[in-house]
């Protein structure tokens, strides 16, 4: 899922300062699961803003802000407001801007990464959406994401006791994980081949990516 | 200045002095020259004069520990003119494949013939921790790119390295170095990774600084079992300890460096820790020389270049010239 966290309140209040009637808009998908922008967090943020910001604060949470079709229920309320504060990821915030071209929209969250929930209050990044998945080679552990340098041909010298020198208290060495997995699977031999330089054109280096599929175009 | 010409028929890949020393089977001595953090020509000249005549070649680091310094190739040209043979260090952190290939063409034209291909320290350790890293290539891919430029006369994209369709290829011919870290984790991947670098085209390897000689010998045994020392010349890295504090720091804080407690204790007990550090370094070099498959020593006297002549002399490695 997409993992996000709320911005500092001062930054949010700075955005909202010029506006009187504000819609605080939550999202019911990823940011609900990661406890950053769902119905509960939206209610909490709206309550704080009512106490500290003044003005007229309305709140609502829709199922998905990244999809235009889910905005019907809040259209009237949104049109009546001066500005929208979105508790969605960056994708959702941009969809709000597209659906309401005349309304200022502000992000309440910083979108962090695509990752997993690793226990109470813990999340970690697992996928960079590089567009050219090689997990089948690396035993189901992504070197592009899990190695701090995205190395494809083995660990650098900065791995000690399973941890990465970039932050030895928090970041596991991706290459230790790859090694352990492939060893357990008896497939260390796959690391003998030299991995080719990546085709970064499949990433954002090739510009904002698009996907067109004729097979589903008529559905 | 006209670069030395290496014909295709030459027995040498690059014709560099270091390549000749290693090909002739002489025990090589290299050192490290860290460029200064400002446009300080005197600092470069001073370090170069300390090393001149004492080493076969000198590594010019590339923004080491991710701190901005004078460009490696620029300092390479300066020390070349001062009579030293540079080994240009190239990291994958700051430049993509376009920039590195372009720089290699320029370095070659200015007379540089050795390079050391590295991953590069992560920028969080340096003075621009908020910078964007590159890592377009990793060090293995970098080695192979430099090798293909030399041996296949092609760029990474496959295009031939020539000015026009009818021109002769004019490729940069480098003696290609790689780094090896015998002590990093996962330990079991260290020899396979070296093997990969050699398969990619490494002509020589300089190791991370060695203190734990027993562990290093165990690593070298694996290296010899695979015959890797026969296709690639291995230079053992050493760094003289300056103080007990430095010994502890290297032992406890630096990933991929293993310092036995006995050295920490010797440094702590010494009346003159600096002399003790030099003494330990000389002992290490003498022992490393005896290990089968070690083709030379790489002395990384960090901001202590003035001690390199003393170490070389005491280790009995004074250059002929």
Image: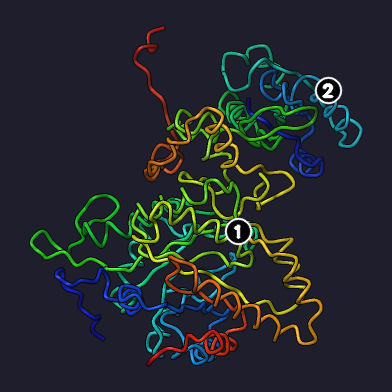
Asked whether residue A199 appears in the rendered view, the answer is: no
Front one among A42 and B132: B132
Q: Marks 1 and 2: in contact by CB < 8 Å? A: no
Q: Given the image, what chain letter belongs to the residue carrying mark 2? A: A
Cα distance in 3D space between marks 2 and 1: 60 Å
Q: Residue at x 49, y 56 (%)?
A: B221
Q: Residue at x 92, y 32 (%)?
A: A51
Of tags 2 and 1, the one toward the viewer is 1
The percent position of residue A42, horizontal first and vertical second, equals: 79, 24
Asked whether residue A156 appears in the rendered view, the answer is: yes
Crowding at mark 1 (Cα within 10 Å: few <14, some 14-19, many 20+): some
Q: Residue at x 68, y 80 (%)?
A: B277
Crowding at mark 2 (Cα within 10 Å: few <14, some 14-19, many 20+): some
Front one among B259 and A129: B259
Q: Is residue B118 above or below residue A115?
A: below
The percent position of residue A27, horizontal first and vertical second, equals: 69, 21
The percent position of residue B223, horizontal first and vertical second, equals: 45, 55
Q: Secondary structure at mark 1?
A: helix
Q: Secondary structure at mark 2?
A: helix
Q: Given the image, what chain letter belongs to the residue carrying mark 1? A: B
Quadrant into which the C terminus of chain B falls: bottom left
Q: Hey, which quadrant is residue B74 in on the image?
A: bottom left
Residue tagged by mark 2?
A43
Q: Is residue B128 above or below residue A100?
A: below
Front one among B85 and B129: B85
Quadrant into which the N terminus of chain B falls: bottom left
Q: Residue at x 17, y 62 (%)?
A: B162
Q: Is residue B23 above or below residue A173?
A: below
Residue tagged by mark 1?
B215
């Amino acid at each position: 899922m997409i993992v996000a966290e709320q911005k500092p309140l001062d930054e949010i209040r700075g955005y909202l300062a010029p506006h009187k009637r504000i819609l605080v808009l939550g999202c019911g998908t990823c940011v609900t699961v990661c406890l950053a922008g769902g119905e509960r967090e939206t209610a909490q943020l709206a309550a704080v803003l009512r106490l500290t910001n003044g003005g007229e604060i309305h709140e609502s949470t829709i199922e998905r802000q990244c999809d235009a079709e889910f905005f019907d229920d809040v259209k009237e309320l949104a049109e009546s407001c001066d500005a929208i504060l979105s508790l969605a990821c960056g994708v959702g915030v941009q969809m709000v801007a597209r659906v309401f071209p005349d309304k200022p929209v502000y992000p309440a969250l910083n979108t962090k990464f695509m990752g997993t929930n690793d226990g109470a209050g813990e999340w970690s990044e697992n996928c960079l959406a590089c567009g050219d998945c090689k997990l089948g080679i690396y035993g189901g552990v992504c070197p592009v994401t899990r190695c701090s340098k995205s190395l494809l041909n083995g660990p650098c010298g900065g791995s000690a006791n399973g941890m990465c020198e970039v932050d030895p208290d928090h970041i596991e060495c991706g290459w230790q994980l790859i090694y352990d997995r492939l060893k357990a699977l008896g497939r260390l031999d796959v690391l003998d081949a030299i991995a080719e330089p990546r085709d970064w054109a499949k990433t954002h280096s090739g510009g904002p990516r698009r996907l067109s599929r004729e097979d589903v175009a008529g559905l | 200045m006209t670069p030395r010409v290496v014909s295709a028929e030459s027995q040498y890949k690059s014709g560099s002095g270091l390549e000749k020393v290693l090909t002739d089977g002489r025990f090589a001595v290299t050192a490290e020259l860290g460029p200064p953090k400002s446009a300080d020509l005197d600092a470069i000249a001073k370090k170069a004069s300390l090393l001149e005549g004492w080493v076969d070649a000198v590594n010019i680091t590339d923004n080491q520990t991710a701190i901005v310094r004078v460009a490696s190739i620029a300092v390479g040209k300066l020390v070349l003119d001062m009579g030293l043979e540079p080994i240009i260090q190239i990291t994958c952190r700051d430049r993509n494949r376009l920039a590195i290939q372009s720089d290699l063409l320029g370095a070659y034209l200015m007379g540089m013939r050795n390079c050391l291909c590295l991953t590069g320290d992560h920028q969080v350790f340096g003075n621009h921790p908020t910078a964007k890293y590159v890592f377009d290539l990793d060090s293995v891919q970098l080695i192979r790119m430099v090798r293909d430029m030399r041996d296949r006369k092609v760029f990474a994209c496959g295009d031939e390295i020539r000015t026009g369709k009818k021109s002769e290829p004019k490729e940069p011919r480098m003696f290609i170095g790689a780094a090896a870290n015998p002590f990093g984790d996962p330990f079991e991947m260290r020899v396979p990774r070296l093997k990969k670098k050699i398969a990619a085209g490494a002509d020589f390897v300089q190791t991370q600084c060695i203190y734990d000689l027993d562990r290093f010998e165990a690593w070298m045994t694996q290296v010899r079992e695979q015959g890797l020392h026969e296709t690639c010349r291995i230079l053992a890295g050493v760094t003289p300890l300056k103080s007990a504090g430095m010994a502890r720091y290297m032992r406890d804080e630096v990933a991929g460096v293993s310092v036995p407690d006995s050295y920490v204790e010797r440094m702590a007990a010494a009346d003159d820790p600096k002399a003790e550090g030099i003494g330990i370094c000389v002992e290490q070099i003498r022992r490393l020389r005896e290990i089968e498959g070690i083709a030379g020593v790489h002395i990384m006297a960090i901001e202590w270049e003035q001690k390199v002549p003393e170490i070389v002399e005491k280790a009995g490695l004074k250059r002929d010239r």
